[in-house]
Amino acid sequence: MKKPSLKAPGLKKPSFGKPGTSGEPGESAAEPVAAKPAASRPSPGVGPRTGISLLAAAAVLAAAFGIAELRSPAAPVGTANAGGTTSEQVERTSLVCPAPFQGVTGSTDLTLFTPAGGSASGGSASLTDIGSQSAAPSDSASAPATPSGSPSASPSASAAASAPGGSGSARLSLSKVGVPATGSAASGDTPPAATAVAGGAYAPGFTVSETTTVTDSRTAGLSGVGCAPAGTDFWFAGASTASSRTDYVNLVNADPTAPAVVDLKFYGDKGQIEVDAATGLTVAPGSTQSLRLSSLVKDPVTDLAVEVVARSGRVGAALHAIDEGKGADYLPASAAPAPTQVLPGLPADTASARLVVAAPGDDDADLKIQVSGKNGWFTPAGHETIHVKAGMIAAVDLQQVTRGEVGALRLSPSDPAHPTPVVAGLRVDRTQNGKSDAAWISGSAPVGKRASIADNRAGASTLYLTSTGDAATVRVTSSAGSGGGTPVTKEIQVPAGATVGLAAPEPGGLNGVFGLTVETVSGGPVVAARMLAVNTKDIPMFTVQALTDDRSTVQVPHAVQDPAVLNRP
């Protein structure tokens, strides 16, 4: 088919270009250039200028339709699904790391990792400190917070940053996909929070681990947390303001220009606890606030669920707990309220466990308690169910919950016809020679297609895999070490409803720390967790983090050429 001519009296050939440019393909509109007004009556045989404009417009429409008919849409990149979308790799990943709770004598390791296997090229990944805390941890009875509407802390420390929310050059950079990079956080009692950003080939599956070691007798413990994207709603189950506990909520606003306004909501065994000082907290741009829970909730409460809600802006949120002389760790954010929650990562040598469940809605929750062992699900003796009143929390001690096996805990509706959304957290204690450490695990989402965790060490990392449905095949890959080594891969069979525990495969010739990647090959779904256990000063220090989908891809709607848009008003 011959293209219609674009030439018409009083018209220039239209150009197609990118927005803001001229003469390049892809311009959003091709409009005729208006002809100059006639100086006198039209010449004989030439119609009025209005007629010429109509003819020109018709020619342009014909040209547009002709091009649309002649050019077939470009083939989509990636794999399309039935919903008309394409799976594309992410091009940028941004994570927020909380300010470490390391005290004067502790130290913190930060580890960056992007798994190999992506199709993108170029890019970079780095971690940058965020401006100093606007409210450092304090034992003061007053809440170290800025109420909404009051003058906020000055963001000058971050205003001159070279990275979003940063305070200067990068503290740590990733030099190669598939090989982790590790370094130390700032020393001292109040090191800053951090933001980590990856682009290009470094973005898909980018993950950052923060691991703190404290050996002081009162606050000793291994604390681990995975840095996470900023968000607007977080749940933590298992907090406390008991006299032996020192719990802090850490809020990070990595945005260098806009403040965030945050509410903290507390739930106990008698319902929601009203705390005026925890409402309308302003977190200044590029700043951090650490809030001691006992300075907000005045009366001691043994078990709490805490919700962090950002009214405006987005924040990173973390909750750190110290049980004096018994251990310390972060409480991982729970999966969003749901009728069924699965908590992976129960060590075989669990000495004691305490379950805290919150029902934040308007309905009571009656839940079955089950544990996944090596042969499938079983019910712990004497703790078959738990009842949680609406708007409250319920807690129960689970002794010898694992029967000496690795496992995962599942909560599900006793009556499937009456599902009630809940959130859950489980404190786990390990002891050795009269010394102990504590870790917390929470409701977690499945691994999905792929998940990774960055900070793994020789002889110290144990992987827990639980198939919550059908039997599954899982591929486990250990990367090269940060200082050298050869990656290794192995496939693991996980029986239906069972939990498999294994020492993380170590790279050949390992030097340094390594990244661990889990992929669901078939079956499933699978939930996973990694325990990092290091004996320090005869204390059985450990921390457990869940592995969840690494968000390496995003669904993008298909775009097709539609000439009909030219007929729409």
Image (spheres, rainbow, N blue to C red):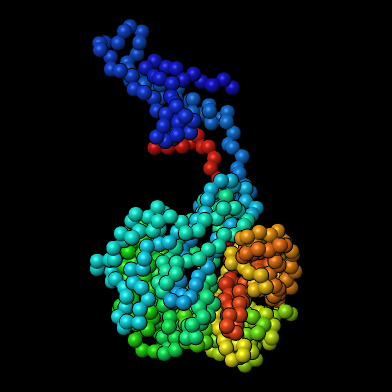
Give residue 266's position: percent from left, percent from top.
40, 80
As drawn, 270 above or below 311: below
Q: Can residue 438 be seen in this view?
A: yes
Q: Front-most of 264 and 80? A: 264
Quarter of the picture holding the C terminus: top left
Q: Residue at x 60, y 87 (%)?
A: 431
Question: Of all residues shown, which one is farthest toward the top?
Answer: 44
Give residue 149's position: percent from left, percent from top.
25, 67
Residue 20 is left or right of residue 41, and the answer is right
Q: In which quarter of the image is residue 448?
A: bottom right
Question: Of all residues shown, which one is farthest toward the bottom?
Answer: 382
Q: Quadrant of residue 178?
A: bottom right
Quarter of the picture holding the N terminus: top right
Q: Residue at x 37, y 17 (%)?
A: 10
Q: Front-most of 248 and 507? A: 507
Q: Front-most of 190 and 474? A: 190
Q: Front-most of 220 and 290? A: 220
As drawn, 268 above or below 253: below
Q: Which residue is drawn at 54% across and 66% down?
A: 209
Count of numbered badges drawn on the protein: 0
Q: Is residue 356 visible?
A: no
Q: Residue at x 58, y 28 (%)?
A: 70
Give residue 332's position: percent from left, percent from top.
51, 74
